[in-house]
């Protein structure tokens, strides 16, 4: 879980995840959203991959990233439980409706 929180600690990586919530994006599309060098963005992508928050698919020279929402949800639920909070997942809230 510490890798997830390390990844979430950086505002650039949080913004990448926010962008990926809308759907998959190539590394170039994501990099265009930020005013940093390509090597810097590559390091951010590596951190997100190590934390298992994103999935990457390579096709030729293009890498496409996708958000792995279940990993993020699990990390947030675990974090909430550490502080004695109980959060409901979407499936639990739809069962009570």
Image (spheres, rainbow, N blue to C red):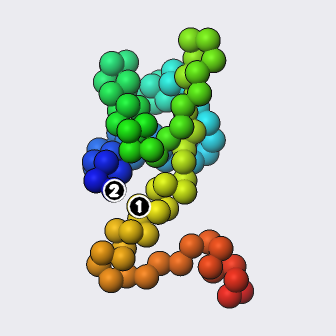
Asked if residue 56 is positioned above or below residue 5 in the image, the reply reads above
How far across and how far down the image is residue 77, in percent?
43, 69
Quadrant housing residue 82: bottom left
Quadrant housing residue 47: top left
Whether tag 2 and tag 1 are in contact, CB under 8 A, the answer is yes
Q: Residue at x 69, y 79 (%)?
A: 94
Q: Nearer the viewer, residue 88 or 18?
A: 88
Quadrant housing residue 40: top left
Q: Which residue carries the number 2 mark?
A: 1
Q: Is residue 86 visible?
A: yes
Q: Nearer the viewer, residue 1 or 36?
A: 1
Q: Which residue carries the number 1 mark?
A: 75
Task: Indicate the secondary structure of the residue bearing disc 1.
Answer: helix
Picture quarter with the C terminus: bottom right
The circle on residue 18 is: none
Q: Given the current orientation, which residue lies at the most extreme bottom position?
A: 96
Task: Work out whether mark 2 precedes mark 1 in sequence or the reverse, and give the earlier one.
Answer: 2
10 Å neighbourhood of mark 2: few (<14), some, or many (≥20)?
few
How many numbered marks, from 0 up?
Answer: 2
Q: Given the current orientation, which residue lies at the most extreme top position?
A: 61
Q: Residue at x 62, y 72 (%)?
A: 90
Q: Is residue 35 visible?
A: no
Picture quarter with the N terminus: bottom left
10 Å neighbourhood of mark 1: few (<14), some, or many (≥20)?
some
How far across and how far down the image is residue 53, in percent?
46, 46
In this picture, residue 5 sits left or right of residue 92: left
């Amino acid at each position: 879980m510490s890798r997830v929180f390390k990844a979430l600690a950086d505002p650039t990586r949080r913004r990448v995840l926010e962008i990926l919530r809308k759907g998959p994006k190539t590394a170039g599309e994501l990099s265009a959203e930020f005013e940093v060098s390509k090597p810097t963005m590559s390091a951010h992508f590596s951190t997100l991959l190590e934390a298992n928050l994103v999935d990457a698919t390579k096709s030729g020279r293009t890498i496409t990233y996708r958000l792995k929402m279940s990993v993020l949800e699990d990390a947030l639920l675990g974090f909430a439980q550490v502080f004695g909070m109980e959060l409901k997942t979407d499936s639990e809230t739809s069962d009570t409706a």
